[in-house]
Image (cartoon, rainbow, N blue to C red):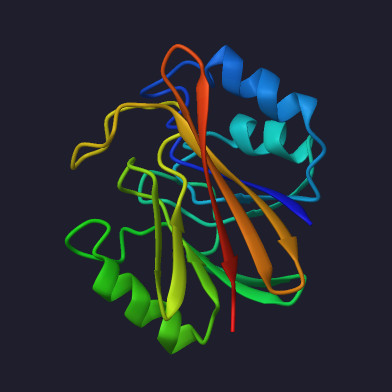
Amino acid sequence: MNVLVIGDTHIPRRALSLPKKISEFIESKLFDLIICTGDLTERDVLEYFETLAKVVVVRGNMDHLGLPDYSELKVEDVKVGVIHGHQVYPRGNREKLVEIGKQKSVDVLISGHTHTPDIYMEDVLLLNPGSATGVWGGGGGSMKPSFIVLNVEGRKVDVKLYELERELSVRSERFYLK
């Protein structure tokens, strides 16, 4: 399964649109699923993602769209939990995110809110796609637009983290989940 993991767009409040290089990239690929960590802020962004693939989305702290706070799904043989991340203080606290993942008995916990991408493995694979528009988040952020593409086969998870400066750069990691 080919999965786009994206979030924290804050369109149109903090950004007018996705950066052109990101929208061109995601529109050129075929995704089986899009997982969105919230803070879309407008239904138009969700509707755009829905034109590309089936979407699983959670409510961010800036969303007023009637979305769930938590979602859980199977991707191949991998149990995935999705939260926005505002449930954790301080922002992005890995220990607390791992604890949530363990409480939910998921293999992978996807969250956003920090606007800084992250890939971390300790009992649970933690993934944060950062902000797709690179906008400032209440606690800072990388200020670089970013997103993740997952390729999942059985319990093998290939993670590609894309960040945009002048061009899209990619960092790849492979995980074999127990």
Q: Is residue 119 left or right of residue 136?
A: right
Considering only vertical position in the picture, is 102 above or below 27?
A: below
Screen quadrant of the C terminus: bottom right
Q: Is residue 104 left or right of residue 29?
A: left
How far across and down, in percent of the image, does residue 63 sit?
Answer: 44, 45
Q: Nearer the viewer, residue 121 or 33?
A: 121
Q: Is residue 135 left or right of residue 79?
A: left
Q: Nearer the viewer, residue 4 or 156?
A: 156
The quarter of the picture where residue 138 lies is top left
Q: Nearer the viewer, residue 170 or 105?
A: 170
Q: Nearer the viewer, residue 118 or 172?
A: 172
Residue located at (43% from left, 27% from top):
145
Screen quadrant of the N terminus: bottom right
Residue located at (47% from left, 37% from top):
41
The quarter of the picture where residue 87 lies is bottom left
How far across and down, in percent of the image, does residue 20 sit?
Answer: 59, 13
Residue located at (34% from left, 40% from top):
115
How far across and down, in percent of the image, does residue 119 sit?
Answer: 42, 55
Residue located at (69% from left, 74% from top):
155
How far across and down, in percent of the image, does residue 60 sit?
Answer: 42, 51
Considering only vertical position in the picture, is 143 above or below 117?
A: above
Considering only vertical position in the picture, is 111 above or below 31?
A: below
Q: How many marks?
A: 0
